[in-house]
């Protein structure tokens, strides 16, 4: 591969690759994730305009912050399973500017530990390469898969950071916030090493 083609962000786990977005990722990403099951607790199905806006947003985070919600590629077959990654919280009503982890996988990839594997890498990157002292994650009360993962990662509820989210979760009550500090992650991280 030519040096110019080498992505500026690339990270491998046992079964997955987190990396910069490529143009050819978007079609399989939306095919896997723009489904009623995946979008249930988010904004519902996105139309073309909504998908384009998200693409611009996540590509913009990569340029602005050096990190974004990266595509999750499965090494075995190159499938784009979804995204997992880091942005700075952009919610003006919420914990604006804090390092925020997020995840979204197509339903065919659920229940196989891929989200946990990608999220562990994401927290390692947050506290390592990207130098965060604390990392938050945001969901809604009904989204037990998402807050279940947050708890599994050792994240703790921070009700004082909850906020009214008028975009993603407008219909599902306040956005709820979990967080973990670098010190807590260092201690909890050891529990994943078998
Ligand atoms: C959230 C999401 C990424 C989790 O994916 P997943 O495939 O279930 O996750 P994993 O198989 O890696 O499981 C990770 C951990 O989450 C926890 N978990 C998963 N589903 C859970 C549930 N329904 N209730 C409680 N905990 C759950 C488990 O502790 C699991 O760890 P364990 O198997 O070691 O016990 C997936 O459900 C998803 O993409 N949902 C739609 C998009 C979305 O809502 N994203 C979050 C927006 S806030």
Image: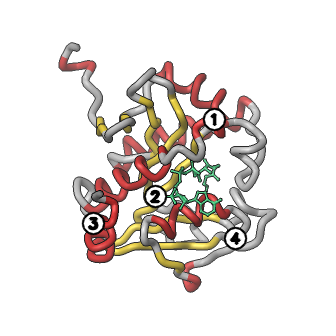
Looking at the image, do the residues carrying marks 4 and 2 touch, with CB atoms under 8 Å apart? no
Image vertical order of residue 100 relative to residue 109, above or below: below
- Horizontal and vertical percent position of residue 121: 34, 51
Disc with the residue nearer the chain's start (4 vs 1): 1
Looking at the image, do the residues carrying marks 2 and 1 touch, with CB atoms under 8 Å apart? no
- Horizontal and vertical percent position of residue 70: 44, 40
| Residue 101's disc number | 2
Residue drawn at x 33%, y 60% is 192
Say few, some or many: other residues with alpha carbon within 10 Å of mark 1 (under 14 / 14 to 19 / 20 or more).
few
Residue linked to disc 4: 141
| Residue 190's disc number | 3
Which quadrant of the figure shows ligand 1?
bottom right
Disc with the residue nearer the chain's start (3 vs 2): 2
Residue drawn at x 64%, y 75% is 163
Asked whether residue 115 appears in the rendered view, the answer is yes
Q: Give the label, 4 or 1, closer to the camera.
A: 1
Secondary structure beneath dot 3 equals helix
Residue drawn at x 43%, y 65% is 153
Mark 4 to mark 1 CA distance (whole Å): 23 Å
Q: Give the label, 4 or 3, closer to the camera.
A: 3
Disc with the residue nearer the chain's start (4 vs 2): 2
Disc with the residue nearer the chain's start (4 vs 3): 4
Residue linked to disc 1: 108
- Horizontal and vertical percent position of residue 146: 59, 59
């Amino acid at each position: 591969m030519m040096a110019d083609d080498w992505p500026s962000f690339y990270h491998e786990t046992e079964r997955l690759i987190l990396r910069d977005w490529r143009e050819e990722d978007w079609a399989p990403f939306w095919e896997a994730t723009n489904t009623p099951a995946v979008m249930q607790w988010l904004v519902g199905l996105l139309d073309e305009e909504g998908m384009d806006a998200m693409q611009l947003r996540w590509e913009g985070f990569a340029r602005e912050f050096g990190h974004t919600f990266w595509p999750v590629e499965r090494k075995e077959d190159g499938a784009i399973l979804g995204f997992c990654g880091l942005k700075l919280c952009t919610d003006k009503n919420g914990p604006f500017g804090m390092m925020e982890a997020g995840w979204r996988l197509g339903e065919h990839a659920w229940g196989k530990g891929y989200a946990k594997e990608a999220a562990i890498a994401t927290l390692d990157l947050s506290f390592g390469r990207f130098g965060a002292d604390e990392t938050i994650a945001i969901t809604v009360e009904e989204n037990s898969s998402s807050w279940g993962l947050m708890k599994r990662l050792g994240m703790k509820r921070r009700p004082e950071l909850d906020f009214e989210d008028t975009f993603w979760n407008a219909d599902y009550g306040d956005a709820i916030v979990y967080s973990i500090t670098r010190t807590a992650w260092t201690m909890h991280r050891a529990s994943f090493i078998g």
